[in-house]
Image (cartoon, coloured by chain):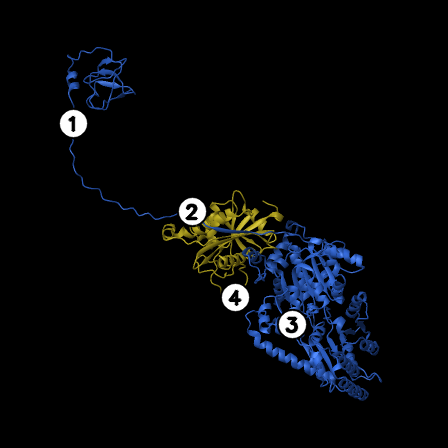
Amino acid sequence: MQTLLSEKFVSPFAVDDNNNVTHLSDSSNGTLLKTFETCEMLDFVPKPTPLYSVHRFQIPVAVADNPWNHLLSQKNDLRTQSISVGTSPKICVASMPITVRTKIDVRSFCFLVTETPPQKNGRDESATTSAVSPQETISELPLESHQEDAANLPTKYTRINVPRDAIKLEDRLNYLLQPPLELLLGQPTLEMPFEPFPYQRSGVSFLYAAHHAILADEMGLGKTMQAITTIRLLIRSGELRNILLVCPKPLVTNWQREFNLWAPEINVQVIEGTPARRKWLWQLDNVPVRIANYELLNRDLEYFDRPRSQGGPHFDLVVLDESQRIKNQNSATSHAVRALSRSRSWALTGTPVENSPNDLVGIFEFLSPGYLSTGMKTSTMSELVGDYILRRTKDKVLTDLPPKIIRDANLELTASQKTTYAQAEEDGTIRLNDMGDSLTIQNVFELVLRLKQICNFDPLTGDSAKLERLLADIEEVAASGRKAIIFSQWVETLIKLRDYLADYHPVEYHGKIPSKQRDDVIRKFRDNKDCHVILMSYGAGSVGLNLQFASYVFLFDRWWNPAVEDQAINRAHRIGAAEPVTVTRFLIADTIEERIDKVLQSKRELFEEIMSCAQGFTSPHAHALSGGMSHGMSQEDIFGLFNLKVPRVRKN
Amino acid sequence: MASEATAYFGFLTVTENPRCGLIGGYLVLNHAGRPVEFHCTSPIRPNRAQEILYGATLEAFLYGEQIAQTLINRAKIKPVVVISDMPQVLAAQEFVKTPLVFIAKSQKRSGDQENKFKIVPQEDSSEENNDENPKISTPSISEMLTCVSGINMSRWSEQKVGRRQLAVPELSTCPATETIAALELVTHAIDLAEPFERICLAVEEAQKAA
């Protein structure tokens, strides 16, 4: 029930919630006049809109007597008056967009991480147990060791190189976002026997992402260690599972040793034995690293020269050590290595170019066939290969390495040697001249070798000017408790020297020493205090050996190519050398030795001059060519030793 | 908290490119420091209205609420902790459950522009403090953090993990001690200040490709 608000009807009427009049009262005193039980529509409600209606109005009312009736019948006289109050001021609203949440575009990249460190099977277990098993979770390692590691954070990090041939952004980011090498190599599950040098970390960084690469560091800078360490990291990251390493046969045991040192957890299998066993070894797929030698590749071609679809082996990586072996792209060895099915190809060599820039073409036929071509301009070639070759020299990166002192021992032949030499040269030259157009380079070679042998020892009397000097020097070496390496190109010369040097308990390392005995030879030379001398042939001992405990190197005779001599010298002058290395190069004056030396020297100088003009290449690695190049002797050079001209037919 | 072997760690930073604006980068690493996810934003630049109306809280809004929140939510993998070298990013803690840790790092990154929030070295106060090479006064982490407006810094406490100074949040869902314990276990594989350099390189590379 509510009271009416209208002034005219408020007093006498009351209405219910449905606007029905429910009773009528006297507004003057509030006396209830009438209660309506039911209501009907009343006419007295002002038009046009009746405000209230009464339904079912059944009780008679004496309207004539009621003064209200008059009032109710009166029409409303409502008047309106409008007063202008003026227009309201117009309000301008300036809206500035403040987006609560701007939509930001996000580029997302996901990377596959497969940490699958290899397990060593059936190998030296002591090596495995010395390292923390990669399977261990980090929580199993003592916290103190973590904190110690963290306290030795490097100030500068070596990042993995992003190869220029990585085109896809995702691939490039995958390399960029990898941990720096200092952290990868510093993990407790990855023990390193020695702390790598910064340049070695750079080498690992270079190889890590490379699918085609030549690591052409100067001998002694640790190409082996860099390759093994990179392989180790790539195996652990799951990027490599199946690797083939090809090296010269004498270096197979050296590679095994180095793997055991730098990656003891990696199982290494040498491919050797009977044909049936070798065939089986080629097909193995559960050994991460296999080692084969170059000679074996030629024999086993049928075992691997098949497409993968036909069951041929495929390698994630093939590494060629001493890759100058394939500089001649027409050789059987070159064909054999190119037949290996592989995803990545690396070449290791201290001398990427031995004789001419075309040597590089041969190596690149293995790395990336067709990338270089024979006869290409040196400058063009340098530009092309710059991204794929990394070469450092000791003088640049190993400033702490003890110096290498080179002494040229210019000697005179003994009287008997002189006589024999003069006779041999005269007879030989006459014979060569008489041969006319039938003269071959082999004929000239024979004379050269004959004369060089006389320079070593007089075949008639056994006299040797070099031996006299050598004995004097070795006596001094032994007296100081040091060790010396003596190189010769002839095993016969080495055997003669062995007898003369018996007091110094020499050991031998050359082609007549079986491969299986060679490790013992090296061990004896290193460990036996009385053993002061190792006699080595250039062929067997000039590459891959670590003899840094020797302080003296004697080149009893000279090789045809200074690069090979450098390799030999660097057996001793390499990382780990504790004291200066003294190199004595024997050279007999006024003989074929002096003539050969002059030819080689002039060619080296000429080449360095050419390459120094080419240093302005854009690539930082362009100097790789110049540093690694050292010319050997050409056909013309060899004929020229005796003032002979190359027969026309030979020139063509 | 996830076991250490399966734990992931997020690293988030924002670089400023004078031409394009702010670019956020977010890297998720596994316990060995290997990348598993990387996300980067398109460049954003505040408009004039935002600059005026957000005032001192603008950076917290852009770095934290907009960039960091977007990136963290975008990743498929949820890390145990997200580390940032920018205090403004901590503003995102209001919107994400993962603890956001601030690290004071020393190296000035390539591409960094002058910024009033630039972090001053705070590695080991005991070293390199000689008269010949006087340092500009080095504020503490809390001083650095309090210069960021719009973030309630009271919940972060200063901690040291390895050689790095951190500000670690105390969250109801993840106590600071748990966060510290997770971080200490990976300091052998991850230098906590190093991944930001990776992010900057990757952002730069992605920008080149864009």
Identify the residue at horizontal 69%, vertical 64% (top origin): A320
Foreground residue among B102 and B133: B102
Task: Examine the rendered structure and indicate whether residue B117 appears above or below residue A332.
Answer: above
Foreground residue among B172 and A286: A286
Q: CA distance from mark 3 to mark 4?
A: 58 Å
Badge 4 element: loop
Of pointers 3 and 1, the one earlier in the residue sequence: 1
Q: Which residue is mark 3?
A: A358
Q: Which residue is mark 2?
A: A101
Labelled disc at residue B130: 4
Label 2 neighbour load within 10 Å: few <14, some 14-19, many 20+: few
The chain to which mark 4 is attached is B
Q: CA distance from mark 2 to mark 3?
A: 63 Å
Badge 2 element: loop
Q: CA distance from mark 1 to mark 2?
A: 58 Å
Residue A491 locus on image (x, y percent): 80, 75
The reply to whether callout 2 and callout 3 are in contact (CB within 8 Å) is no
Label 1 neighbour load within 10 Å: few <14, some 14-19, many 20+: few
